[in-house]
Amino acid sequence: MAHDAPLSPLAPKGFPDMPAVEGVRFAAGAAGIRYKGRTDVMLALMDKGTTVAGVFTKSKCPSAPVDWCRAKIKSGKARALLVNSGNANAFTGKKGADAVKLAAKLAAAGAGAKESEIFMASTGVIGEPLDASKFDGVIAKLAAAARPDAWLDAARAIMTTDTFPKVATATAEIGGVAVRISGMAKGAGMIAPDMATMLSFVFTDAPIGADALQAMLSKSVQGSFNAITVDSDTSTSDTLLLFATGAAAKRGAPKIEAAGDRRLASFRKALDAVLLDLAHQVVRDGEGARKFVGVEVTGADSAKAAKRIALAIANSPLVKTAVAGEDANWGRVVMAVGKAGEKAERDKLAIWFGDVRVAHKGLRDPAYDEAAASAVMKRQEIDIRVDLGLGAGAAKVWTCDLTKEYVAINGDYRS
């Protein structure tokens, strides 16, 4: 299914060069979980001493792998990551929990690690039992074949309705020593900002303790993965894991245990950049998407209010279908602001499509030009900006349009 879909018109023109992150190796294989003729399982192996942090879905119906990861992450230690596509292993009861245990046992054997150091994620159809015995034999081969440069193979193996693999990388410095942060993500539908809005796995060779890693990750997601939405639906399986192998310590990088350490400034910036890059790629691959839309709200009562209003606009089917139809229907933006449940005053509201101000002080802009507004809507990338004129609260979120293809993809997902 994933590989049959035409490439999203918003896809990046190419993939970044993904150099090895010292201390981690990848492999991808086919276990026949749901798809035929494609890879559907990915294994990442990490060196001893690797620390881990994570954020997970806020769904009240989490998958069995999410339950497993939440329990294991408390130790802050990791040696392997096992991810499958085609079956979410969610809403699967005791069978789902047993499947996770078997998968962890097989992965631990393959990695030569403890089961408590194995992390897992599954993506795909909800409610169908996962036959973890299909991993038997496959994992041992993956462990033997794992190599530091297999980034794109790993990213492709975790795709479902995605049309392209998503990878990003950046460098930073800690104590004058260069460190690398690289990651992959999957996600195209059931994407709403309730952390994490898909699957994403990020790796660094920086020597950072688990608590510091967790604090930075929890903060960084707010402006990236928690600021995107494709369809307002939050998955049962959302998982974002950050692994730090510590290999840069051999090159003189200091081990850092406190998130507030000033030596982490460069690292924090690079982490933000990688997560935002991956989050934008998820939106650009939104199911059926043809337009990439930034929604910026300023002048709100508070930053929290600004974000809530921005998401009301970004999640509105009426706003998103207007964008799909290239219709500069700013009345739908007014509607979304009004229903958001946050403080707003009609007669102070201003709205822009791109650099064209369409509404001002509660009225259509006196200089409104339909042709100029329509020209903005024909772009592949569109910015919608709203100023409430009330305070200093500001937020930005990203979304895509809602097209007939979205309905077709999701009407046919299980068949």
Image: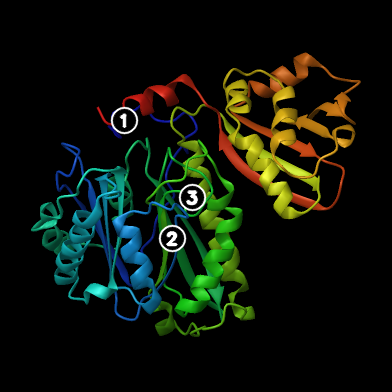
Quadrant of the frame with the C terminus: top left
Q: Residues within 10 Å of mark 1 (few under 14, many from 20)?
A: few
The image position of residue 90, as x and y in percent, is 30, 49
- For label 3, the residue is 278
Tell me: residue 277, above or below residue 325: below
Who comes first in sequence, dot 3 or dot 2?
2
Could you tell me the amino acid type at mark 3? Leu
Residue extending farthest left: 137
- Please say if 35 is above or below 396: above
Residue visible at 15% across and 55% down in the picture: 132
Q: Nearer the viewer, mark 2 or mark 1?
A: 1
Instruction: Specify which label sits upstream in the sequence, 2 or 1.
Output: 2
Q: Nearer the viewer, mark 3 or mark 1?
A: 1
For the residue labelled by badge 1, is the local secondary structure a helix, a strand or a loop?
loop
Query: What percent of the width, then of the height, locates residue 298?
Result: 78, 45
Q: Is residue 131 left or right of residue 90?
A: left
Tell me the element at label 2: strand
Q: Nearer the viewer, mark 3 or mark 2?
A: 3
Name the residue nearer the viewer: 186 or 273.
186
Q: Which of the labelled discs sits on residue 265, or is there none? A: none
Q: Which residue is mark 2?
A: 182
Q: Which residue is mark 1?
A: 413
Where, quadrant-wise, is the N terminus in this rendering? top left
- Of the image marks 3 and 1, the number of the one nearer the N terminus: 3
Horizontal placement of 207 versus 340: left or right?
Answer: left
